[in-house]
Amino acid sequence: MTAKGEMISITVTINGLPYTAAVSATMNLTDFIREVANLTGTNVGCGEGECGACTVFLDGSSVNSCIVLAVDADGKEVTTIEGIGGPNGDLHPVQQAFIDCGAIQCGFCTPGMIMQAIWFLKQNPDPTPEEVRAGLEGNLCRCTGYEKIVDAVLTAAQQMNAVETSVR
Amino acid sequence: METTIAYMKPKTVKEALKFLQKHGGNAKIIAGGTDLLNQIKKGAKTPAALVNLKDVEELRGIAVTGKTVTIGALTTLFEIQNSEILAEHFPVLPYTASLMASPQVRNVATVGGNLANAAPSADMAPPLLVLAAKVEIHGPPKKRLIPLADFFTGPGETVMTGENILTRIKIPLMPKGARCIYRVHTLREAMDISMVSVAAYIKGRRKVGKARVALGAVAPVPMLVPEAAEVLEGQPFIPERIIAAGVEAREACKPIDDVRASANYRRHIVEILTRRTLQEIADGATS
């Protein structure tokens, strides 16, 4: 229990590295990621959980980091867009598919789209276009380039499934 | 957002109650936080303290005991959506959860929060009302179990005080031959709040034994419509009775004009959606 006005010391592991800071009870996780860890790939769109631009993984679940308290990430693992590539800077297959399919216009929604697409493909590795749309229902693209985003997620699914089959 | 307020993350309901009592009702409970954080950001709520329930493990999970299914208040909408127990006993609940918000919000938002926030449009409420769910409340004057139908008192308001915690939802198993479904009327298919929603519970196929009809987003609180149930019960389950139930629902609702729809439009939709929902049950729908 903390007294009124006291800051709360938390440690959040982001992309494998621990970050410790004293924060207010009402600080949100996006601010912690951007201001404390200086990872600015996580964008703030609406700031109220409608647009998905701030999507990150919290202990493996996709969440809108703008409506999650930083204190709720204390002791937990956060993955941001900066943490999904390979060790040598290789792109994640979903990132590569977004490039290959031209699924990027202004790019602002892209980190959140890619994070949500990765989480969605873990739940549903072989989706229909309709299922992809439902899986990304919480991510808005104000350029409205949804067709190519859906194409990219389907392409990524195919490639990831092909790799999995060849490994077997 | 810079002002720091008192904060506590208890491990038990008992600890949480003590903290709430200490702050004399000026503390706010946070569970998923998907509504509360926005209210705090907008200045609509300015709690003196936050009590974060996320570590209270006893409030998680879904279990069947005897003839009752108990859902912990902290159970997320994602967990409701994917629960095998609920898929077996109340398929309407996973279906309802799947309609709500977005995957990212469903991963965090809780069923207890949806009820305790008491939005007139709270999607979990109408199906739980027609399933005759009860809610367990801890805190002064004492621990109690009340029908969900007696829980809501106004927009954003319930019978709970600032020193109470909604802990569990208890639902009696449906008898054989009973079906329950939920339908919403929205402009968009994603990230939308219902203009009108209807839940219906019917026992009996040719003839209606027990009936319950509930409406969302068309009154200060999610509401049961006993008048609609009355015109169905003991009667053959035929279009004439279904049409009559729609008229009763229209008479009973008390909608307002707002950004999503006018009151008149809502009344019109209540009648039609009630009729369609009941007809779907008559045609064999189960969720």
Image: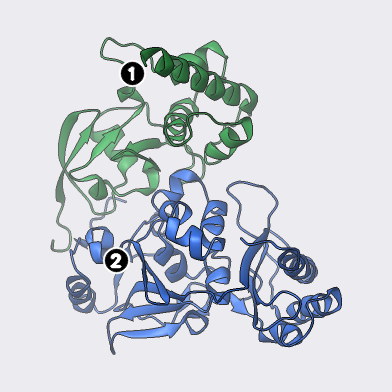
Q: Position of residue A102 (x, y in %)?
A: 57, 14
The answer to whether residue B176 is left or right of residue B230 is: left
**Vertical order, B143 against B175 (above or below):** below
The chain that appears blue in the image is B
Q: Which mark is residue A85?
A: 1
Res. B249 image quadrant: bottom right
User: Closest to the observer: B70 or A114?
Assistant: B70
Task: Check disc 1 and give the amino acid type.
Answer: Gly
Reading the image, the residue beneath label 2 is B59
Q: CA distance from mark 1 to mark 2?
A: 37 Å
Q: What residue is at 33 percent from the left and 18 percent from the top?
A: A85
Q: Give the drawing colour for chain A.
A: green
Task: Check disc 2 and give the amino acid type.
Answer: Leu
Mark 1–mark 2 CB contact (< 8 Å)? no
Q: What residue is at 30 percent from the left and 49 percent from the top?
A: A69
Q: Position of residue A1 (x, y in %)?
A: 13, 63
**Vertical order, A48 against B45 (above or below):** above
User: Closest to the observer: B126 or B234?
Assistant: B234
Q: Position of residue A146 (x, y in %)?
A: 62, 28
Disc 1: CA contacts within 10 A as few (<14), some (14-19) or many (>=20): some
Whether labels 1 and 2 belong to a single chain: the reply is no
Residue B72 visible here: no
Disc 2: CA contacts within 10 A as few (<14), some (14-19) or many (>=20): many
Q: Position of residue A160 (x, y in %)?
A: 44, 19
SS type, badge 1 = loop
Q: What residue is at 58 percent from the left and 76 percent from the top?
A: B130
Q: Which mark is residue B206?
A: none
Residue B82 visible here: yes
Res. A147 image quadrant: top right
